[in-house]
Amino acid sequence: MELKDKCDCILIPRIFSLEKQNQVCTNFNALYDLVNNLFDIEILNYNVDITTRNYQMLGFLKLGEKLGFSYIKTYNAYKYAEKIKRMKRKKQEEEQRLLLTSNKIKILLAGHPYNLYDNLIGKTVINFLSQNNIDIFYSNKIEQEKIKEEYQRITPDIHWTHNKEIAASTKYYEDYVDGIILISSFPCGPDSLMNEQIAHKIKKIPVITLIFEDLNNEAGMITRLESFIDILKNLKEEKNEQNN
C-alpha cells in the first residue's frame, strides 16, 4: 500500500522451497498471491520452488528477461553475485571463529536474519549487548558444512529450511558461549515450535526467548536482558572459581 502509486513495479518474489521435502515459511510462500489478489499493481516477481523444478537460477534468468537483459548477461550477473555471497559468508565464518577464544561473556543471538539485523528488533538487542562488553555470535554465521550434523542433534529433521540454521547454531555454540538469546517476531509458526525444542535440548547454558510484538516496549526487553546478563556473569564467576 505504501509503494502502490510510487513505483512502476514492485518486486515480490514467491519462494516456496529451497530444498527437497522442505519449505520456507508461509509468509514467503503466500506473499505474492496475497499482494496480487489485493492490489492492482505491476508486480515484478520470480518463483523459487524445488518441488516443481523452479530453481533459483531459472527464476533469476526469467527476471532478467523481463527486465530486458539477455540470458548470458543475467547468468553472469547471477554467478558473480553467488561468488560474492560465498566470499562474504566465509569472511563472516572466520570472524566468528576468532571470537571463540575470547575471555569476555559470549552470547549467541539465534533467529532469522531479517529479525537479527532489523533496526527495531535485533539491533536493539545487539546495541545493548555491545554496550555491556558482550561478544556476540550470530546464528546465520555458523559454518555451513556443520548445519546438517548439528541440527540433527536437536531433532532428526526440520521441515523449515531457515530454522535448520537456527537450531544447528544453538547446539554447536552450546559448548562455546555463556548463553543463548532466541529472537522471534510474533506470530511466527515455525519459530514457536522450534524454539520450544531448542530450549528443551540445550542443557549446559541458559537460554532466553525474546518475542517481539509491541515494538514500543523496549524498556521491558532491556530489563529482561539485564537480568539475563547478571545470571551469566554469576555463572561465569562461579565457574572461574571452581577452575582455580
Image: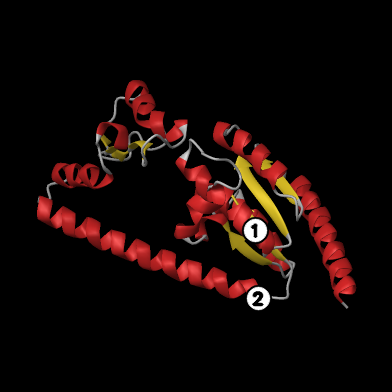
Q: Earlier in the sequence, mark 1 or mark 2?
A: 2
The amino acid sitting under disc 2 is Thr
Q: Left of 42 or right of it: where is 109?
A: right
Give coordinates of residue 205: x percent, y percent.
75, 55
* Point 34% across, 25% down: residue: 33
Q: Is residue 111 above or below residue 36?
A: below
The amino acid sitting under disc 1 is Leu
The count of marks equals: 2
Residue 108 badge = 1
Residue furthest bottom as drawn: 244
User: Dot 2 lies on which element?
Assistant: helix
* Point 61% across, 33% down: residue: 193
Q: Left of 3 or right of it: where is 42?
A: left
* Point 61% across, 62% down: residue: 137
Q: Is residue 208 above or below residue 226?
A: above
Quick one: quadrant of the N terminus? top left
* Point 65% across, 55% down: residue: 124
Residue highlighted by disc 2: 101
Q: Is residue 39 above or below residue 190?
A: above
The answer to which image quadrant residue 156 occupies is top right
